[in-house]
Image (spheres, rainbow, N blue to C red):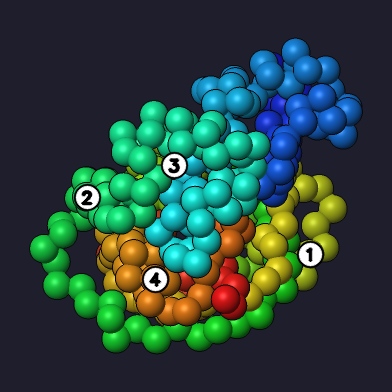
């Protein structure tokens, strides 16, 4: 396959995924998406399956349920009907059926504490639950963030293999002689409730002065909005524990609710590129006042 053909196919697949995440709370129409991307329906489905290993409809269903599982935990003023609508379900009945099939419990059982055991089984695969990490003294800053444009590589899985993707991005930075930039990660998938091997982790470089003429990487826009910013330093394995604490403890008692926008990280020291696997980062969680 020619490099130009590969890049075009990758862009189409990434554009589809970005569109799905952006409009996950609506009735996503694949026919309209094909018209917007100027590609046939058959071609679109084939490219997507080749790139992500599953079809578009499976991906949409998975993303909807993941968003719903987060909202059921954190949005205590939203009813199950509210959350089913927020994640694009046309009826509560179809939502209940799909949720139980995915998580082996009803939304009510999940909301009433079932999420804790489910999440702990995933988190234990990447870190020791007995580590003495106390996040309860972390006080976030509430910030209004602008849109952020970034060039990215999408990575399948949430584990140490992410290092390979960051090395590719670092090579791209050196090749283009980029001096001023931020290293970021977009968390469309929440690793505390999504099987780690299924997580879509997006490694991003945001340029201070975006004057590149020959860009070989796709770009995306991180949405503007109100975020709770958590600053943390630590080692590999600590980030997933921070995410678990934010969603399972801080958000529940904070007086805020989260939204369907993704959370993201800005690295000041990237543990995937550091020999000591240590990091310094800011973690941003989208919130709204209720």
Q: Nearer the viewer, mark 4 or mark 3?
A: 4
Residue named by callout 4: 252
Relative placement, left or right, of 144 versus 94 is: right
Q: Secondary structure at mark 2?
A: helix
Quarter where residue 239 is shown: bottom left
**Residue 218 spot, x, y in % from top left:** 71, 44
Asked if the residues shown at circle 1 and circle 2 are in contact, with their CB atoms under 8 angstroms apart, the answer is no
Q: CA distance from mark 1 to mark 3?
A: 29 Å
Q: Is residue 136 above or below residue 215?
A: below
Graded by Cα atoms within 10 Å as few (under 14), some (14 to 19) or many (20 or more), the crowding at tag 1 reads few
Q: Residue at x 44, y 55 (%)?
A: 72
Residue 123 seen from this side: no
Residue named by callout 2: 117
Residue 96 seen from this side: yes
Q: Secondary structure at mark 4?
A: helix
Graded by Cα atoms within 10 Å as few (under 14), some (14 to 19) or many (20 or more), the crowding at tag 3 reads many
In primary-sequence order, the first of circles 2 and 4 is 2
Residue named by callout 3: 199
Q: CA distance from mark 1 to mark 4?
A: 39 Å
């Amino acid at each position: 396959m020619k490099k130009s053909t590969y890049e075009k196919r990758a862009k189409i697949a990434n554009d589809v995924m970005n569109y799905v995440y952006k409009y996950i709370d609506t009735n996503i129409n694949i026919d309209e998406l094909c018209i917007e991307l100027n590609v046939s329906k058959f071609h679109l489905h084939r490219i997507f399956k080749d790139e992500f290993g599953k079809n578009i409809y499976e991906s949409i269903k998975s993303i909807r349920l993941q968003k719903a599982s987060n909202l059921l935990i954190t949005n205590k003023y939203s009813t199950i009907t509210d959350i089913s609508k927020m994640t694009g379900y046309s009826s509560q009945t179809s939502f209940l059926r799909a949720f139980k099939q995915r998580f082996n419990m009803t939304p009510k059982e999940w909301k009433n504490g079932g999420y804790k055991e489910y999440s702990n089984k995933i988190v234990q695969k990447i870190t020791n639950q007995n580590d003495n990490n106390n996040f309860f003294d972390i006080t976030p800053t509430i910030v209004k963030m602008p849109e952020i444009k970034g060039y990215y590589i999408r990575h399948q899985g949430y584990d140490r293999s992410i290092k390979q993707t960051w090395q590719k991005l670092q090579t791209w930075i050196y090749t283009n002689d980029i001096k001023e930039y931020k290293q970021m990660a977009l968390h469309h998938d929440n690793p505390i409730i999504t099987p780690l091997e299924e997580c879509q982790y997006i490694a991003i470089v945001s340029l201070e002065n975006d004057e590149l003429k020959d860009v070989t990487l796709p770009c995306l826009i991180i949405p503007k909005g109100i975020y709770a910013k958590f600053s943390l330093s630590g080692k590999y394995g600590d980030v997933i524990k921070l995410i678990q604490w934010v969603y399972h403890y801080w958000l529940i008692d904070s007086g805020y609710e989260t939204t369907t926008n993704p959370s993201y990280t800005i690295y000041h020291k990237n543990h995937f590129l550091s020999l000591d696997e240590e990091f310094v980062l800011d973690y941003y969680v989208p919130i709204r006042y209720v």
